[in-house]
Amino acid sequence: MKKTGILVLMMGLMLGSGYMAFFREPVDERGNHLAKAEQLSAGEYHKDAILEYEKVLELEPGDKEISVKIAHEYLLAGDGRKAVEQLESLISQNVGGPTAYTDLICGYLMNRDVKTAVAKVKEGYEKYPSDEGIDLLYHKLRGTYEETQDLYTALTDYRDGYVVSRNMDGKLCLLDMEDREWPKGKKPDAIDDYVVIQEKGKDVLLISVHDAAECVTTPDESAATMKTGTDAAKDATAWDGTAADAKVGNSVNAAAMEAKSSVAAVSTNFRYVDADGYLRVSPKGDFLYLGCPRDGRILFQDAQGWGYLDEEMKDLGVRFEDATAFAEGIAAVKEADGWRIVTPDTITEAQDSNRYADVVTDTWKCCSTAGNVLVKKEQGYVLVSSKGEVLSEAYDEARAFVEKEGVAAVCRNGQWGLIDRTGKAVCETAYEELCSGGTTLVAFRKDDLWGYMDREGSVYVEPEFRSAGVMSADGVAYVTVQEKESSEPTLRMIRMNYFYEDNSTLF
């Protein structure tokens, strides 16, 4: 009985424990790893947290939320490459939502890949416009920029996507938006004069060449030749100078360069060539200045004054005290009784039209880039149409438009503002100084430093430059910086990280 009782008791205990084990909840292994991972992450042990999260994935391989957490831990651990790799995969599967995008953007920034970060923040902003994290990154990144080395010391404003620059050797060259020198494959030895690009989309340049060392390439020549036989222009295009002086460090725009209107009567042999350096046309005449072909007319200056050539390079036979290049089918000429606006067909016509005391031109000697002209009348500077219709209020000073859809800087009572091409005031005259701008950002001055804002006054770059040039449609501008008070100011190219809205403009 005693033995039997013991066996019964043992069986009861075994049954009891089995009974209890059967009804007890199973161990939450996933929850334990998850809790431990979160605890490790809070203690900044991110590599260990990743190991715990990976154990959760082993239990549930399809858990995408855990994959997002792992990517976030890689980011917190400083491994931007691994974080980006995982997040790109998750986003391609539409996993992670705005959190994945914010981490991805931060990952690219950690990897110093600002360009891709900008692309991703725009992509995320379009998908999740109301997310606070993406919105914060969007507005933070749009005011940043990348900077080049100190390669150039002076240049013009942008014209059709090009600028004229003076390199560290003191020679002039033509730069495109990617900071590449033109003509393609050429490195001229003796550039002194400035270069002009023809209308946008057409690769025709204007250069001037020494008479004594004529050097151009033609369609039948693969390299430059030189008639005098010297070595000065071998394998290069020699450029002769009459008209460009660099003004570095002025309060308006250190990147501005003006052409001298009074130049020595030197016989300069001008040549039009294409972007590959091939000779296209050779206008005849002793020119002191020769402009770019626009609207079928070419502005020039000779010993008799200013005039125009037609499409066949023939002199129209009239001279003026001064004149501007054509743009948008409009130019202006100065006669004894003042300036008048002309079209390609009315240059030589003696007609009754409005006369103005002054016409505002840009650094490329154009007055009508926006299709209308800023002129000076008795009441001040106003914007007028080609027919003389007044489109704006009167201002004390004005600066030329630099792009058709851009804005012009105007001043009243010492305060600067902006108007658009219709004459409408888009920014009140409330700033110390402004430069005209294109479709992107506008340079503004505060005290002695320059920054960039949009046309509504929202600041993108706080004033930090000694001077600031016109920003191109691609967000490229040249600014003057001074690292130390004792150092010389240097010119640098910056490329803004901002975002286009809708079509092709920021505004």
Image (spheres, rainbow, N blue to C red):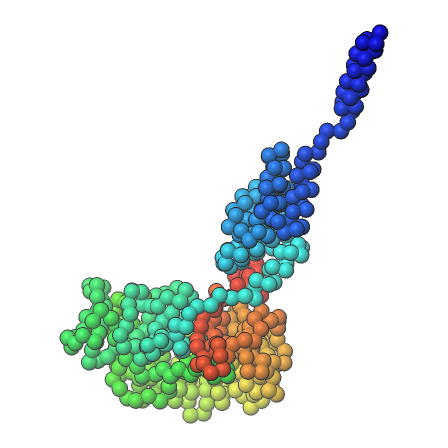
- Residue closest to the far left: 229
Residue at figure coordinates x 47%, y 71% from the top left: 477
Residue 90 visible at all: yes
Residue at figure coordinates x 61%, y 80% from the top left: 431
- Residue closest to the far top: 1
Q: Name the image quarter holding the N terminus.
A: top right
Residue sitting nearer the eye, 25 or 211: 25
Q: In this rendering, would 192 be left or right of 420?
A: left
Residue sitting nearer the eye, 28 or 382: 28
Residue 81 location (% of width, % of height): 51, 50
Residue 465 location (% of width, % of height): 51, 76
Q: In this rendering, would 151 be left or right of 368?
A: left
Q: In this rendering, would 131 be left or right of 313?
A: right
- Residue closest to the far bottom: 336
Residue sitting nearer the eye, 14 or 318: 14
Residue 14 location (% of width, % of height): 77, 18
Q: Is residue 189 above or below residue 473?
A: below
Residue at figure coordinates x 57%, y 49% from the top left: 74
Q: Hey, which quadrant is residue 33 in on the image? A: top right
Q: Name the image quarter holding the C terminus.
A: bottom right
Residue sitting nearer the eye, 83 or 230: 83
Residue at figure coordinates x 56%, y 71% from the top left: 461
- Residue closest to the far front: 2
